[in-house]
Amino acid sequence: MTTESKVKNATTLLHSGKVKERQEGLSALRNIFSQNSSIERFYNVAGRDGRKPSHEIWAPILDGLQTCIRSEKSAFVTAKKSTDVIEKRLAAAAGTYRWFVEKSMMHFAKKTVLEICHFLYREMKVRETLIPSVALDFIKAYECVASHPPHLARLEEDEIEWEE
């Protein structure tokens, strides 16, 4: 099975309505990109010969992770009983998102960087209150993106409207 097909399977799992499948998707993504060279290889193969823009290479993975986070966040917000288990799942999804951003951020296009920043800002809070289980990972992911000089320059170029 090629890396591209493994990634497609993992992102399909991340979109699942079933908790177990989403957790399997997070685990699969971490396994696929566990080696430092795996991101570079995936980027080179998926975007070979410039046939696929950078944004299109990363969009399915980031979308899958974001969908998983939104699903866990929704479960956390609407839970009527103890939220400890749900909060741990949400934290695991946020941690995987940060981990992926840290590993692949050198390859992100401007559009991807802006989408990540907006997602991080919107999803780290509920009713204007930070969610402790995701806030630290999201702030670290944002710091990682902003610490890369080309990305920081892109953020400074655009007048980003942070209000929803």
Image (cartoon, rainbow, N blue to C red):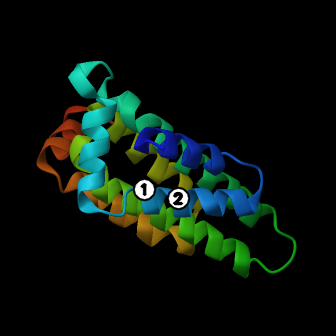
Choose between 137 and 14: the one closer to the eye: 14
Percent from the top left, x then y, of residue 89? 64, 70
Percent from the top left, x then y, of residue 73? 67, 59
Q: Are marks 2 and 1 in contact (CB under 8 Å)?
A: yes
Choose between 70 and 68: the one closer to the eye: 68
Residue 11 location, quadrant: top right
Location of mark 2 (residue): 28
Q: Amino acid at mark 1?
A: Ile
Task: Say whether residue 109 is left or right of residue 84.
Answer: left
Residue 101 location, quadrant: bottom left
Image quadrant in which the C terminus is located: top right
Identify the residue shown where x is 48% and y is 56%.
29
Task: Say whether residue 96 is left or right of residue 113.
Answer: right
Identify whether 145 is placed above or below 131. above
Q: Amino acid at mark 2?
A: Ala
Location of mark 1 (residue): 32
